[in-house]
Image: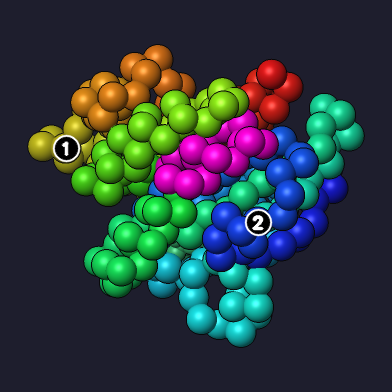
Amino acid sequence: QQVEFVKGAVSMETLPPDELPEACFAGRSNVGKSSLVNMICNRKKLAFTSKTPGKTQSREPHIRRHGPVHLFASLNSLLLLRFHLVDLPGVGYAEVPKAKKVEWLRFYRDYLSHRKSLRIFFQLVDGRHGPLQDDVELMKLFAESSSKNPNQVAHAIVITKMDKTLSAKVLALFLLLPALPDSAGQAQEGVMDKVRRTLSEAGCDEETPVLLTSSASKLGRGDVWNYLQLALQD
Ligand code: GTP
Ligand code: MG
């Protein structure tokens, strides 16, 4: 697989022409979007990650030069696929100013409604706590906006940072702590159930796929690729 940085953008007008099928990664700041892009491309530093929320939209010179929406072109010779991967700026985090959140929600809305090449919207949710208010808002936004797009946009929920959830549960098991959840399996089901309930409350399809991932352990890499491939080849 070859992958290269194409362009940063700040708005619909500054996006490159929509000539290649596109897959995007969306979600709250710090949820792990950039890390997931790196994980599925098998790269360490393709997309810029940081402990500090909002780094994809930061004012650092090398990022500002391009803008916070980062597009990568990928050529997968095994799958004979050429497409764009889009690392979106995070929305909704206490330390990101409200005005920024509004600005990016507006961009998300336009992008979902009008980007003709968009094939799949991977929406990331932090596995440590499941969907929060900002995630629900984003699900609603997807349901409303993608229906206006003349082309079909697939939706998949990606639960991130499962290594943190799993290791905590496994450790608890190992120490035989009684009051903690019974097993890692149950912890996973808990997050899955929460996500399913939230999807239906937000007006999204209840059959939306929910994938469990960890960029640290590469859990779910194959699943993300399967859905990518399905959506891009449709
Ligand atoms: P913004 O660009 O600010 O919106 O954030 P982002 O969603 O791109 O998150 P990013 O990939 O920069 O990750 C944020 C922090 O979470 C970084 O410190 C990552 O190392 C960490 N992180 C991301 N994914 C995982 C994961 O699967 N496991 C663990 N343990 N840490 C992760
Ligand atoms: Mg990022």
Give whichever of 88, 116 is nearer the camera: 116
Q: Is residue 173 left or right of residue 6?
A: left
| View extreme (left): residue | 179
Q: Which residue is mark 2?
A: 15
The answer to whether any part of residue 226 appears in the image is no
Q: Is residue 158 left or right of residue 68?
A: left
The answer to which image quadrant residue 198 occupies is: top left
Mark 2 Cα within 10 Å, few/some/many (few <14, many 20+)? some
Q: Is residue 187 left or right of residue 106?
A: left
Q: Is residue 212 left or right of residue 82?
A: left
Q: Quick check: is 135 in the magenta stretch?
A: no
Give the SS element for disc 1: loop
Q: Which residue is mark 1?
A: 180
Quadrant of the rendering where the N terminus is positioned: top right
Q: Amino acid at mark 2?
A: Leu
Q: Of the numbered discs in the image, which one, if any, rests on residue 159? A: none
What residue sits 37% from the left and 29% below the top?
Answer: 143
The answer to whether any part of residue 99 appears in the image is yes
Residue 20, compared with residue 183, is above or below; it is: below
- Estimate the x, y position of residue 151 in percent, counting from the top left: 59, 26
Give whichever of 89, 175 is nearer the camera: 89
Mark 1 Cα within 10 Å, few/some/many (few <14, many 20+)? few
Give whichever of 182, 96 is nearer the camera: 96
The Cα atoms of the two marked residues, 2 and 1, are separated by 48 Å
The colour scheme used here is: rainbow
Looking at the rendered image, the disc whose residue lies closer to the viewer, 2 or 1, is 2
| View extreme (top): residue | 207
Residue 109, compared with residue 229, is above or below; it is: below
Q: Which residues are magenta?
A: 109-124
| Mark 2 or mark 1, earlier in chain | 2
